[in-house]
Image (tube, rainbow, N blue to C red):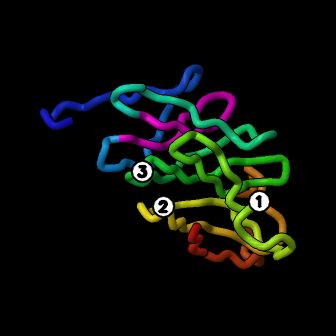
Amino acid sequence: TRNSQMEDLGALDGHIRSFATGINNSGRVVGYSSGALGDHAFLWSKSNGMEGLGTLTGGDYSRALAINELGDIVGVSDSPVGNRAVLWTRQREMWDLNQLIPAGSNFVLTEAVSINNQGQILAIGQTGKALSKQEHNHSREEEPTRVVLLTR
């Protein structure tokens, strides 16, 4: 804090650890909280504390990775078809960013890692099927991985 003190941001209910991955100039922090049921994305603010951001329908884990000055957040959530790059809008609507790429392209956005104040998003994707939670940290090298720039 400004007076050289630490502030414990806590963890979501039932979780024992939390990891911060991004902060904006307003002091809002994003990351994920971890417990027996896995990782869950959060938004922390001085006024509201730590709030869970949820997962895509049918998902059981998520991670928030970056936040812009407007309060838009990007990250990853699993779903019944594997990991998906996601956007939580400042209104807390959650979007699968794969809706922004052409259907049938055989390309899957698996993680969104950064968002700027113009709403441009850096995301990571692969051709072929989406990776499951277990495969995410051990992606197969034969699958081409690309970083893409999404502009809304």
Q: Are marks 3 and 1 in contact (CB under 8 Å)?
A: no
Q: Secondary structure at mark 3?
A: loop
Disc number lying in front (3 or 2): 3
Tag of residue 131: 1
**Residue 38 is covered by the magenta coloring:** yes
Q: Earlier in the sequence, mark 3 or mark 2?
A: 3
Residue occupying the point 19% across, 31% down: 5
Most common SS among magenta residues: strand
* Residue position for label 3: 70
The numbered mark at residue 103 is none
Hey, what amino acid is under mark 2? Answer: Ile
* Chain part drawn in magenta: 28-44
Query: Label 3 vs label 1: CA separation?
Result: 30 Å
Badge 3 amino acid: Leu
Which quarter shows the C terminus? bottom right
Vertical placement of 54 versus 122: above or below? above
Q: CA distance from mark 2 to mark 1?
A: 22 Å
In the rendering, which numbered label is found on residue 115?
A: 2
Asked if marks 3 and 2 touch (Cβ < 8 Å), the reply is no
Task: Please name the residue shown 74% across and 61% down the image.
Answer: 99
Q: Is residue 137 visible?
A: no
Q: Nearer the viewer, mark 3 or mark 1?
A: 3
Work out which residue is located at the far right of the displayed protein and give it. Answer: 104
Left or right: where 46 falls relative to 103 = left
Amino acid type assigned to the residue bearing label 1 in the image? Leu
